[in-house]
Amino acid sequence: MATVQKIALVFTIIGALNWGLIGLFEFNLVETLFGSMHIIERIIYAIVGVCGLINIGIYFMHLDETK
């Protein structure tokens, strides 16, 4: 499970950095890298979203362990 957690964290960080670039500079790195391949862009966004949900679950599991 630790490997899945690390992969999810990496994708979540990549997603957060991309949103930071969009907010600060109006630069979408994913769109720049994959240009006209909209299906790949959507898949990447979906993966980042799922990884964010995994990280939320991990966060709440760790809260339960600290009690």
Image (tube, rainbow, N blue to C red):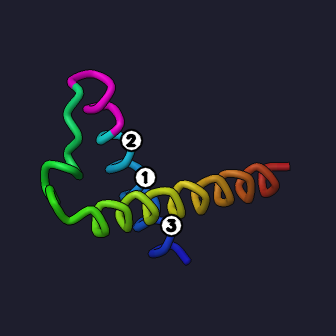
Q: Give the residue at mark 2.
A: 16
- Whether tag 2 and tag 3 are in contact, CB under 8 A, the answer is no
| Residue at the spot 50% in from the left edge and 61% down from the top edge | 51
- Whether tag 2 and tag 1 are in contact, CB under 8 A, the answer is yes
62 or 19: nearer the viewer: 19
Residue 39, by quadrant, is: bottom left
What amino acid type is highlighted by mark number 2?
Ala
Q: Give the residue at mark 3.
A: 5
Residue 36, by quadrant, is: bottom left
Q: Earlier in the sequence, mark 2 or mark 3?
A: 3
Q: Which mark is residue 12?
A: 1
Task: Provide the residue span drawn in magenta.
Answer: 19-25
Q: In the displayed structure, does residue 34 sit left or right of residue 59?
A: left
Q: In the displayed structure, does residue 22 sit left or right of residue 47?
A: left
Residue 12 in picture, x, y percent from top left: 43, 52
35 or 21: nearer the viewer: 35
Which secondary structure, mark 1?
helix
Asked whether 31 falls inside the magenta stretch, the response is: no
Asked whether 21 falls inside the magenta stretch, the response is: yes
Which secondary structure, mark 3?
helix
Distance between the Cα atoms at labels 2 and 1? 6 Å
Residue 20, by quadrant, is: top left
